[in-house]
Structures are given as structure tokens and as C-alpha cells.
Amino acid sequence: MIIATSTSRPQMRLLRLARSGLALLAGAALPVAFAAETGTTGAAPPATPVPVRIGAYLTSLYDLNGANNTFVADFWLWFVHARNRELTPLKTVEPDNARDFKTSLETVEEHGGERYHAQKVRGLFNHSWDVANFPFDRHELTIRLSEAQTETDGLVYLADTANTAFDPNIVVEGWRLEKVSIATQPREFNSAFGLPGKEARSRYAGAVITIAVRRDALGIFIKLHAAVYIIFLVSLISFLMDSSKDAFFTSRVGMLSGMIFTVVLNSQRIASTVGGGNAVSLPDKIHILTLFALLGALITVLITRRMHAAGQSARALRIDRQAGLWTLVLYSLANAALIAAARFA
């Protein structure tokens, strides 16, 4: 005997709903399981910036001009990137601190899986010359380059430090070339340059070529200061002149006044040659020191003249001799300190 069981309509309806829910859950779980198995998700992977290797080789350096705050450099510039990337880095690179920038001999070559771009560059570049320690100054001349089209989320620079160097035959009159190096340094802007829908910030790949130079100091120092040192030594003769006599007094005052005027003119001439804006250079300090020494000698003349008039001639002559000796000692020590400070800064 078969016993048939009956199912009510509400129960049948619940059973169909349960079966539909299970089918939906199974359909949703399949893509998740597939993604977990293959390691992929439905979202697109983030873009990876294209690495571009950048390097430079300095072939010439000249016109290092402190008065105009510039220098001129000739160099080879190259970029290397993956061959499957269609890039034109030579056309999108921008010199950030150049007044003039000319290129020539552009070349593009394929080497295995890489593409090589190179060109010859001649540029007039800005440099803020710090001449406080002139002529014992050292400088790091910089050439700043940056990508002008693609931001760092699409392109980044890698420094080719192994091949960046300089021609050992480069001769820069009055200077010694010590080192040329390159480092990457992204360029940031607080602007999107009007791009719609973008935050007012942008970041581009950048590189800095650094040229380390130092001045040949000894010859320049002698040329600049020989006259002022001779003037100082001659001024010491004034301490031996008897200011009690009108002729000697007048000659002494006239000689020192003329020396002060000559030192001022020489200082202005050197300042216009050295440049550096409002910076106080070592020659400025030495000329100022010399002016104070000459002023001290002139004041000594006036003091001893009054002492002679007061009948204190013996004391006046003794003060002249002592003042001359102390002037020589203090002036020499102060010069040595100024030169040492500039030389070993």
C-alpha cells in the first residue's frame, strides 16, 4: 500500500523560492571562485609608470660668468627605455633653468629590447653665484631637466650614474673641473595647468646634472690684492714721518687720503668683475680692512699733531712707532683669519 503525502500550496511556494535563491548564490559565487583561482579581479590593474634611463656626458664648459649669473655647457644627453613603448623623450624634455637651449645630431637606435635616444645639447644656464669665499670658492653648477608631457604616474626617470661623466680634456681657464653627476628629482607644480576635473597639483619626472668646479685661487688672489697690499705697506711709512713739521704733516695726510681713495676705486673695480650681487666677498673684506687700517693711520696723524702742538713731542713720536707696529700685526692677523676662513669653508 502506497501512502501519498500532499503538500500545501504555501509550502510549495516556499520551496520554489528557496531553490531560486540557491541558484542565484551559486551564480554569484562562480566568478569570485574563478577570480580567486586565477588571481584576477574585475577591477582594472593600476597603470605602471614607464622607467626611462637618463644620462649625460659633458664635452665643454665655458663662460662661467658671476656678473650675469650664467654659465655655458655642451653635453650629450640620452634616454633609454623599453622598445615596446612609443616615447619621444628628446622632444618632451624641458630645460628648467636655461636661458638658451639648442639641440643637434639627434639619433634613435634599437638595441635588443631597448630603444636609445641621444642628442647634442648646448645651453646657457642660470646659476646663483655665491662669491663670499672668492677666489677660494667652489660651486655646483646645475642643469635641471624635466619631462613636460607625461606625469610621474605614466613616466619616471632613472639616473644613468655609471655613464654620466665629463671629457678629461676639458680646460676651463681659471677653474678646475672636479666631477659631473646626475640624480633624479621629480618636478612638482601647484597647478594642473587648467586640465578639467583634475586636482590643482601635478608631478613630472625630473633630473639634475651637477657640475662640481672650484676656482684656481692663488694666481687670481695675487692679481687682485697685490696693489692693495702694496698700498698698505707704503702707508706704514707715514708712521715714521714727524707730524710736528708742517711739510711732513701735510704730506702724511695727503698720502693717506690718496691711498683711501685708491683702495675704494680698486674695490669697486673688483666688485664689478666678481659679481655675486650684494654678497660680501673675500676681496671686499680685505679692502674694507685696509680702509680701516688707513683710517686708523690718518687718525693717528691728527692725534700726534695735537700732541706736538701741546709740547708732548717725545710721547707723540712713541705713539707713532707703537701705532705703526700694532697696525702691521693686527692687519696681518686679520688677513690670515679672513683667508683661512674662505679657504677652508
Image: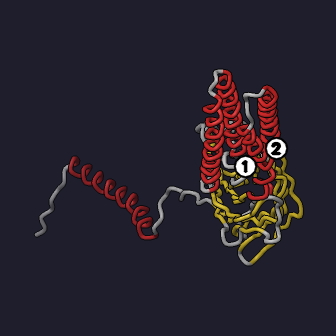
Tell me if I can see residue 222 in this picture.
yes
Tell me if I can see residue 198 in this picture.
no
- Horizontal side of 107 relative to 51 (left or right) equals right
Give coordinates of residue 161: x percent, y percent.
Answer: 66, 68
Residue type at mark 1 is Ala
Q: Secondary structure at mark 2?
A: helix
Gap between marks 2 and 1 measured at Cα: 37 Å
In the picture, residue 164 is in which quadrant?
A: bottom right
Q: Residue at x 58, y 58 (%)?
A: 47
**Residue bearing the label numbered 2:** 273
- Horizontal side of 129 relative to 190 (left or right) equals right
Q: Residue at x 29, y 51 (%)?
A: 17
Q: Which mark is residue 148?
A: 1
Give coordinates of residue 59: x percent, y percent.
Answer: 82, 65
Question: Reading the chain from its start, which is encountered first: label 2 or label 1?
Answer: 1
Outermost residue toward the right in this view: 105
Front in this rendered view, residue 229 or 325: 325
Outermost residue toward the bottom in this view: 112
Name the quarter where the N terminus is drawn: bottom left
Dot 2 crowding, Cα within 10 Å, few <14, some 14–19, many 20+: few
Give coordinates of residue 289: x percent, y percent.
Answer: 67, 39
Q: Nearer the viewer, mark 2 or mark 1?
A: 2
Front in this rendered view, residue 135 or 168: 135
- Horizontal side of 115 relative to 344 (left or right) equals right
Give coordinates of residue 16: x percent, y percent.
Answer: 29, 53
Front in this rendered view, residue 239 or 51: 239
